[in-house]
Amino acid sequence: MTNPYEPPSTPLDRPEGPPLPDGWVPCPGCEGTDIKMPGFTWWGGAIGQKIISHVKCNDCKRTFNAKTGASTTPAIIVYQLVVGAIVVGIIFAIRM
Ligand SMILES: [Zn+2]
């Protein structure tokens, strides 16, 4: 006979928070899993954050790479340089 008042066993280390999508790591700042990818960023528009896996923790507001947990700041700079080079290239191509 089972005891209905027995607390349910929780083998999970972190029962709180929503599950992470495949390939995403928990927040490097607070170990939280409440992580979202913004729909729009000031530096990447609507697609930049998808290209470099830029996400934000809803608990501590830290932003990082969803796949590595590293800072996305260098990737944002590279992204802006690449986009800038493409824009300059297009302008030159039009003026030629
Ligand atoms: Zn966090």
Image: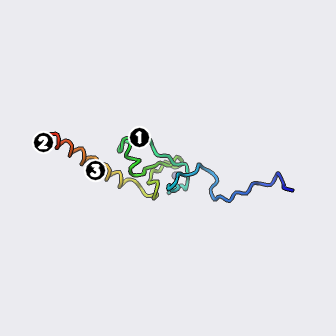
Amino acid type, residue under disc 3 in the picture: Val
Secondary structure under tag 2 reads loop
Q: Position of residue 30 (x, y in %)?
A: 54, 55
Q: Position of residue 4 (x, y in %)?
A: 82, 51
Amino acid type, residue under disc 1 in the picture: Phe
> Which residue sits at x=21%, y=43%?
90
Residue behind mark 2: 96
Q: Nearer the viewer, mark 2 or mark 3?
A: 2
Report the side of 43 relative to 17 (left or right): left
Secondary structure under tag 1 reads loop
Q: CA distance from mark 1 to mark 2?
A: 33 Å
Report the side of 79 relative to 50 (left or right): left
Residue behind mark 1: 40
> Which residue sits at x=46%, y=53%?
66
Dividing the picture into quarters, in which one does residue 11 lie? bottom right
Residue behind mark 3: 82
- Disc 2 vs disc 3: Cβ atoms closer than 8 Å? no
- Looking at marks 1 and 3 on the same chain, the residue that comes earlier in the sequence is marked by 1
- Looking at marks 2 and 3 on the same chain, the residue that comes earlier in the sequence is marked by 3
